[in-house]
Image (spheres, rainbow, N blue to C red):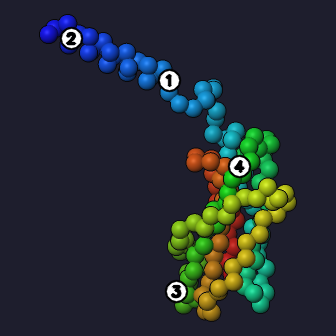
Amino acid sequence: MRSATLRLLTVLLAMVLLAGLAGCGKKTRPVPPDTVLPAPITDLNYHLDEKGVALSWSYPRHTVQGDRLPYRIEKFELLRAVIPVKDYCPDCPIPFGPPIEITAQSSDKGRVTYQETLLRPKHRYVYQVRSKAGWFVSSDDSNTVSV
């Protein structure tokens, strides 16, 4: 009985050690966050026409430190707040809704555009955008645009 228990414990210990050695992911040296974070977008702007509002911004090319991005941007998160004009307060925190995900296309060489056509009258729209290259690789918020 004691021999069977010892054998079972040995097998369990070997399995735990093997699982710990296997791990997952590519093992590399740690990287400081500033060397991989995309620089925030600073040129978010808009154009109003009869169709609605068209937002545009430059495709990020550099990290926060000014180095070339070592990866491609996967998507953009557009933050949007819709506020009735009577409730708008320029000094109050902006009540952004859930982010709208925009997939980055390989053809997005220079500028990215987003068209919003369903605008409500007597409402103010406030936008910000940030770029993402993975789960934990996200830029800071861009400049704020109010329409």
Query: Eyeballing the image, is 65 above or below 52?
Result: above
* Secondary element type, mark 2: helix
Q: Amino acid at mark 3?
A: Asp
Q: Alpha-carbon distance for marks 4 and 2?
A: 57 Å
- Which residue type does callout 2 highlight? Ala
Q: Mark 4 or mark 1, which has the lower sequence index?
A: 1
> Which residue is most to the right?
110
Nearer the camera: disc 4 or disc 2 = 2
Extreme residue toward the left, this view? 1
Task: Give me the disc on residue 22.
Answer: 1
Give the image location of residue 137, x and y in percent.
62, 47
State if disc 2 and disc 4 touch (CB < 8 Å): no
Find disc 4 in the rendering and name its residue: 38
How many discs mark residues in the rendered view?
4
Distance, label 1 to label 3, CA atoms, is 56 Å
Q: Which part of the image, by quadrant, shows the N terminus?
A: top left
Determine contact: label 1, label 2, CB under 8 Å: no
Q: Relative to 57, does residue 92 appear above or below in the rendering? A: below
Image coordinates for residue 127, horizontal then vertical, percent = 65, 72
Q: Quadrant of residue 109?
A: bottom right
Q: Which residue matches tag 3?
A: 87
Badge 4 or badge 3: first in the primary sequence: 4
Q: CA distance from mark 4 to mark 3?
A: 34 Å
Q: Separation of disc 4 and disc 1 at Cα?
A: 32 Å
Tell me whether the residue at label 3 lies in contact with that at label 2, contact meaning CB atoms closer than 8 angstroms: no
> Of the residues under marks 1 and 2, which one precedes in the sequence?
2
Mark 3 falls on what kind of element? helix
Q: Which mark is residue 4?
A: 2
Residue visible at 74% across and 43% down in the picture: 71
Q: Quadrant of the C terminus?
A: bottom right
